[in-house]
Structures are given as structure tokens and as C-alpha cells.
Amino acid sequence: MTRPILNIDEATYSDLEDLSRQQGSKMPAERYGGRTAPIGRELGARQLGYNVTVIAPGKRAYPFHCHAVNEEMFFVIEGRGEVRIGAQTHPISAGDVVACPAGGPETAHQIVNTGTAELKVLAVSTARVPEVCHYPDSGKFCAFDPEQRFVHIGHAGKSVDYWDGE
């Protein structure tokens, strides 16, 4: 087993814009920004994923999205912001816990740093695969299975027949 304890001040953070570039895409830096430390695997987690995400003032870390399979929980470590869940927006600050169960657009969520200092959040989620995420603002979806090294991002309605190409 790996070391079961990690102080988040010792975590290794990666810039979200750099991660996006490494994956071959360009993050819109005018709206998104911050850094993340994926700590779950480092601690030996198998059925849960955890990361610490630090969101820059005035920015978001990820697009508004919902999960078909996995549930997420966010614990605000420091800072202030808001979380958009479905059609509602709620203020959040240090000490708040946010539940985001799997579901449809009513469970879609996004955290925004509305403060002037960094917003630091611990994210914990189930780690079930395969997973499908939906992005209500853009109409995109993402189907992925890291175990099979499969990722597909597209727009609903652009599909092919089951027998196409067979």
C-alpha cells in the first residue's frame, strides 16, 4: 500500500491550462483557471477519486456538467464562491459541503470563484467506469472508460446506426 496520509500542502499541483494543452485542447483562459492535485491514486484509493482543486478568482475549474454514473462531493477548504446546481446558484464558503449525485441536467454542477482570493476545494467522487457526462450549456457529452483507454466527446444527435460499417 502507498502512504495512506497526505497533507494537501504537500500535494503536487498541475496548472489546469497546462493539463488542457497536454490533452490537445485549449482551455478558454478568460473564464477558466486554477490548478489541481489528483491525490486519490497517490494515497492508494481504488473506489473513490479525490483531488484538491484551487480555482483562481473570477474563474471556474470545469464546465457545467452532470454525471450519469458517478456521484461527487465537494468540501470548501478556503475561499468563497458559488455553486450552480441545475437551475439554481448557491453561495459557498470555507466549511461548506456540496453534494452532487449522479443524474441529469437537474444535477449538473459548476463551482465559480466569485471572491478575490483563491478558492480551494476538496473533491471526492465515486470512481465507477464507464462514465457518461453531459454538458447542458454546450449540448456536448463525453463517454469514457479509462480502463479501456476510450474517450469520446461529441454532440447529442450526431450518431450512427448500430450496424453502420459492419
Image (cartoon, rainbow, N blue to C red):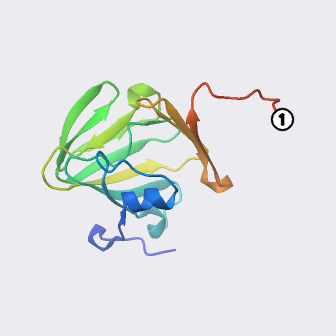
Residue 16 vertical placement versus 42 (above, below): above
Q: Residue at x 26, y 44 (%)?
A: 97
Q: Is residue 88 left or right of residue 146?
A: left
Q: How many marks?
A: 1
Q: Amino acid at mark 1?
A: Gly
Q: Residue at x 44, y 60 (%)?
A: 19
Given the current orientation, which residue lies at the most extreme right position? Answer: 166
Pointer 1 residue: 165
Q: Residue at x 31, y 74 (%)?
A: 10
Residue 151 visible, this angle: yes
x, y percent for residue 65: 42, 36
Of the 4 image quadrants, the one containing the C terminus is top right
x, y percent for residue 110: 33, 39
Given the current orientation, which residue lies at the most extreme left position? Answer: 116
Q: Residue at x 42, y 71 (%)?
A: 4
Residue 68 visible, this angle: no
